[in-house]
Image (cartoon, rainbow, N blue to C red):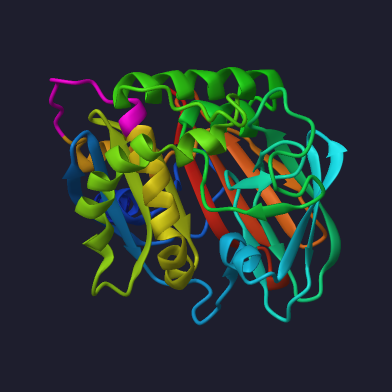
Amino acid sequence: MKRSFLTLVATLALSIVAPLGMVGAWGSHFGQKPQEKDDYRLEGPFTKGNLTVFLIHGKDKIKGQTFLTLEEALIQKKVIVRETREVNQLTIQNISTEEVYVQSGDIVKGGAQDRMLVVDLILPPRSGVVSLSAYCVEHGRWSQRGTESASVFSSSANSVASREVKLAAKLKSSQTEVWREVSVAQDKLSANVGTRVNGEASPSSLQLALENKDVQKTTQSYIDGLSGILDGKTDVIGYVFAINGKVNSADVYASSTLFKKLWPKLLKASAIEAVAELRHGEKFDAPKPADVRGLLDDSKGEEKQKDVSSRVQMVTKESDGNVSFETRDRARGDAWVHRNYIKKN
């Protein structure tokens, strides 16, 4: 009798706890090492054309913390990104009194070749010169372009707008694959905007393709339709986007302030990718919230840790269908600052 009573209690406990764990955890599953649970709430879908966005609401983990973004810091001349004459290596120096957040996928324009940055980085004030991993997103040029400096990079107004380019750099670590996927992305954009988007000054440059006036014009309707979905919301910490009805990627931050700063750049990249993947005449249903949670809650795969700097560590976890990249900050007790999730197919 006593044993039957204990069995009943255990069964009731599991029936209560299991559903709660399914809704709010970033991937805590049986058989895995227990992880800290981070509750979140999805809002959406918000759809414009073939682009669908879900907002992620949650609590700030580093409330009150403000970073300068790389784009802001370059405009304000508070960081210097220097050419090293090595394709996959640059240097960066924070000369300000503020912390600077650098995000993987950011494109820096100029130098001997435009580059995409591979990993997140947090630069402390007066950081000194720090190494910065990069991949070239411009095949062939190795000299000054027009009036740009060949020794430093002038701006970072765009992020990589292609899941395949991101995977080639962040997961496959292949410069050859990056160049190939850049070319594919340019061809897709050209087909869907009705003109060659390759820049005359450097036809292989992804950055110049993203700056193309027809790309910008076609993308603007997406931006106009979705840019205001954050208005009046103070607890949005990230977003998930889907193209043609299929979940593509997600970015989640430990600071709602940081996400709000990055939102225009993130949305623009998602919109450009939607233009590249546009299928004229076809309509798609938005993905179900369960499919979105399937990306965010996927905890399968072994963690692989990599020290990006003395302060920042990147943790990669890959399953059959997804890959995630988590940026941890040792200055905050290894607290996570950014999580990037990508569907592999």
Q: Residue at x 18, y 44 (%)?
A: 47
The residue located at (70%, 34%) in the rendering is 135
Instruction: Tell me: 169 left or right of 217.
Output: right
Q: Nearer the viewer, residue 279 or 174?
A: 279
- Pick the front one: 36 or 61: 61
Residue 170 in view of the camera: yes
Which residue is found at the position 28% from the left and 58% from the top? 227
Number of labels in the image equals 0
* Magenta span includes 282: yes
**Does residue 46 lie above or below 89 as drawn?**
below
Query: Residue shown at 28%/38% (left/top)?
Result: 218
- Chief secondary structure of the magenta span? loop
Res 292 seen here:
no
Q: Residue furthest front?
A: 147
State which quarter of the image contains the C terminus.
Answer: top left
Residue 127 x, y percent position in the rendering: 82, 69
Q: Could you tell me residue 206's position as x and y percent?
A: 55, 32
Which stretch is magenta? 275-285
Q: As drawn, is 166 to the left or to the right of 109?
A: left
**Membership of 12 in magenta stretch:** no
Residue 202: x and y, percent? 62, 29
On the rendered structure, is 242 left or right of 283?
Answer: right
